[in-house]
Image (tube, coloured by chain):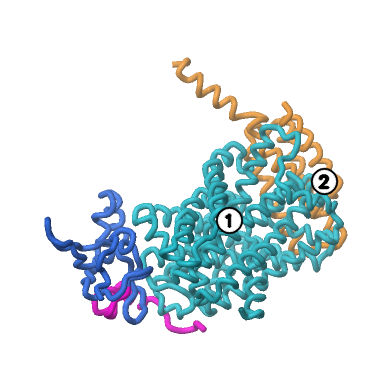
Amino acid sequence: MRRALLPFLLIAACSKGPEADLQYISQARSLTAEWALVNEQAERGHLTAAYVDTMHQDLRQQLQSTAASLTNPRSAYGRQIQAVLREPDDAPPHELRAYASKLKQIEDSLESA
Amino acid sequence: MNPLELTLGIMTAVGGFVDISQLVFSGQAGSKFGYVLISAFAISTIGIMVFSEMCGRVAAVAHQPVFSLMRHRLGLKLGLFTLIFSFLSTLITCAAEIGGLGMILNHLTGAPYAVMCIASTLVLMASMWVLPFKWIERTYGLLGLFMVVFVVAVVAIHPPWPKVIGGFVPQVPQGLSTKEMLSFSYFVVAILSAVMFPYEAYFYSSGGIEEGWGAKDLLTNRVTSIVGMGLGTLLSIAIVALAAQLFAPANVAPQIPGSVALQAAIPFGKPGLLLALLGMLFAVAGAAVETCMANAYSVSQFFGWEWGRHSKPWDAPRFTIAWIAVMLVALLIVLTGVEVMSLVEYSIVFSIVVLPLSYFPLMLLANDKSYMGQYANKWLAKGLGWLFFGFVTIAAIAAIPLYLLTSGG
Amino acid sequence: MDPFGHLKIVSQLLDVPIIDKDERSCGIVDDIELGGSAGKEMRVEALLVGPGAYKGRMPKWMYWLVRKIAGNRMVRVPAKAVVEIGSVVKLNVCGEDLGLHQAEDKAAGWIPRWGAM
């Protein structure tokens, strides 16, 4: 019985962890960077209030969905994404970019692994 | 050839060229791969020029739209198979456009997304009811010209022009990992699908019949197909270049369609943002109308019903019921909560799989001298047509594996 | 002149749109009724229009689905009503006289007659 289950256990093991989460890390990185860009342009007075508010809602919603899709939410990248979600809507762009850079580093190291 | 009519036709084709799929993939293509995927847009545009010109020519000479002739060529069973799959792919595309409309209106007004989806659907349906065909096409096409703000934005940000022009040359970026190579391939397939959507052929050929095209309009058809679509693709290419210049350095690969409007906000501030959102709104609205009508055309032509908006809605009742039903079902799909980006991905993959079945009978018809007489395909149209048929067939086979391997790029 | 004469039934007649003398669409040639017998001339007796005509042209399971969705109505268009065969089949009578517009007329009852330019 255990031998029959082994292939399925192996497949299950492969579908968890950083490899499986790479697409979500990439999405979270981009969403965080988009958020930073929105806030930067909002600070410069380039955006309407309606656009800023609705983009904040959409970005946060997408980030929450991405975080919920992680197979390993307690990982370093999972904690980074949760940290981003704790930021207020009008978080300083440089802080958001710092999170995006960290996620990019994790993404790059996983891709090269 | 009436110069005013021709100019309006070209401008309509330009403003009506871009839809939500192209907005999404242009932004992502530029941010992920820089300028190199400009060539994918350029080459795909040649493909849609070739097939649109053929569709218009078949409609003008045979006085029959592509789907009627397709059933005759493919027979009942294969024709029904093509109808069902193209209907489903176009329905999903229509849903993506409606979702995109809701999203853009949400960004413009702050009103809730679902309410904006419902409101915009009702407005679209009202416009399709009240306006005759020519004015439906012209209204959305001409208002879509607000998208030109993206072209102006590219000039304003002073991109590296040698790289932009170099992007027109087909190439594969150096040093890509296997994963990145698969993603690049998926983007090539997705761009081909987004530019050469089957609904465009059905709508264009049916539109030719609606406007009463004959042999005298063949030059108009050719100029509109080539110039209109050629200029239209510059809008998508502008978004690619803007994404390469503005998004890529900022690690942004737009996950939300509304992010594309930032490309005009960065150089021009609020006026740029508003023009971009308005351009996107009308381009996507036009695409929603086209996909809806393309489905109603396909079903009506396949079963031999009265069809068309050149007559009043009550003179073609089953056609009218068909487009109303398509719009409402597309709206229902959106209201189930499925994300716009997911709908875009599904419509891209579904459509590319159907594309060879859509274009194969068109090639046979346009080559057939018994239908087309002296207007049958000459060597250039024949050669290019079969070449692009080969491309779409390869893309159709590769689409689903690439989608699964790359999780949609 | 006999519009049928010598013609290729599949490539020239089957699945061709039909229009009546008022230029109204009347469906598609869904099947053909042939007359004649062994050793004698074969002639087209009638065109068959409607989902009921699909029966001989698709597998049983497919026709079952078609019947569930669209019914099995079929109209017989006698050959003498056909005046021309080309990219469309043209009739010399009104489609209504042959019962070809029943579904369209039924659908028209649902469409309000106002508001359109």
For this view, does C25 lie left or right of residue B102?
Answer: left
Q: Which residue is mark 2?
A: B249
Indicate which disc, 1 or 2, sits on the residue closer to the N terminus.
1
Compared with residue B214, is residue A27 higher up or lower down, i.e. above or below? Answer: above
In-front residue for pair B210/B250 = B210
Chain letter corresponding to the colour blue? C
Residue at (34% x, 82% y) in the render: C22
Colour in which the image shows chain B: cyan
In-front residue for pair B407/A5 = B407
Compared with residue C10, is residue B13 higher up or lower down, i.e. above or below? Answer: below
Q: Which residues are magenta?
A: C90-117
Colour in which the image shows chain A: orange
In-front residue for pair B327/B41 = B41
**Three-letter amino acid code at the position of disc 1:** Met
Q: Which residue is mark 1?
A: B196
Residue B222 lies in what quarter of the image? Answer: bottom right
For this view, does B168 lie left or right of residue C102?
Answer: right
Compared with residue B179, is residue B239 higher up or lower down, i.e. above or below? Answer: below
